[in-house]
Image: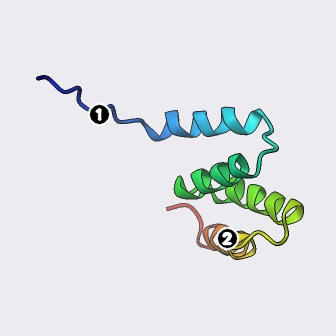
Amino acid sequence: MDRAKPRLISRGDLLAALDRAAGLKPQDLAAIQKLAEGYKLMNELSKAEGFYLELLDRFPALPGTRENARLTSMKSFGSFISGPK
């Protein structure tokens, strides 16, 4: 039996998919969390931070949101200070 090889997705394709999803302006808690995590995993910290801050504003009691917003903000600021690699 032949198995199909998994297709690797490029960083650009993944970011484009995240941007398209973000453009839909999701209101669902889970969708916003997934966008924040996706951008964080792709090291797009300023975009991730925006979604974490939105979650913090709309769902202040949501566990982990404040910490994620703080971490992405600090990492984003650190990247700004150290400059591009």
Quadrant of residue 81 within the rendered picture: bottom right
Per the model, the C-alpha gap separating discs 2 and 1 is: 31 Å
- Tell me the quarter of the image containing the N terminus: top left
Q: Which disc number belongs to residue 59?
A: none
Identity, as a three-letter code, of the amino acid under mark 1: Pro
Residue 26 position, x and y percent, is: 78, 40
The residue sitting at 23% across, 30% down in the picture is 5
User: Which residue, given by chain and number where applicable, does mark 1 sit on?
Assistant: 6
Identity, as a three-letter code, of the amino acid under mark 2: Asn
The residue sitting at 75% across, 74% down in the picture is 66
Mark 2 vs 1, N-terminal side: 1
Local secondary structure at mark 2: helix
On screen, residue 3 versus residue 46, left or right, reads left
User: Which residue, given by chain and number where applicable, does mark 2 sit on?
Assistant: 68
The residue sitting at 63% across, 50% down in the picture is 34
Residue 39 position, x and y percent, is: 61, 52
Residue 21 position, x and y percent, is: 68, 35
Crowd band around label 1 with a 10 angstrom C-alpha radius: few (<14), some (14–19), many (20+): few
Quadrant of residue 8 within the rendered picture: top left
Q: Are marks 2 and 1 in contact (CB under 8 Å)?
A: no
On screen, residue 83 versus residue 70, left or right, reads left
Spot the residue most to the front.
1
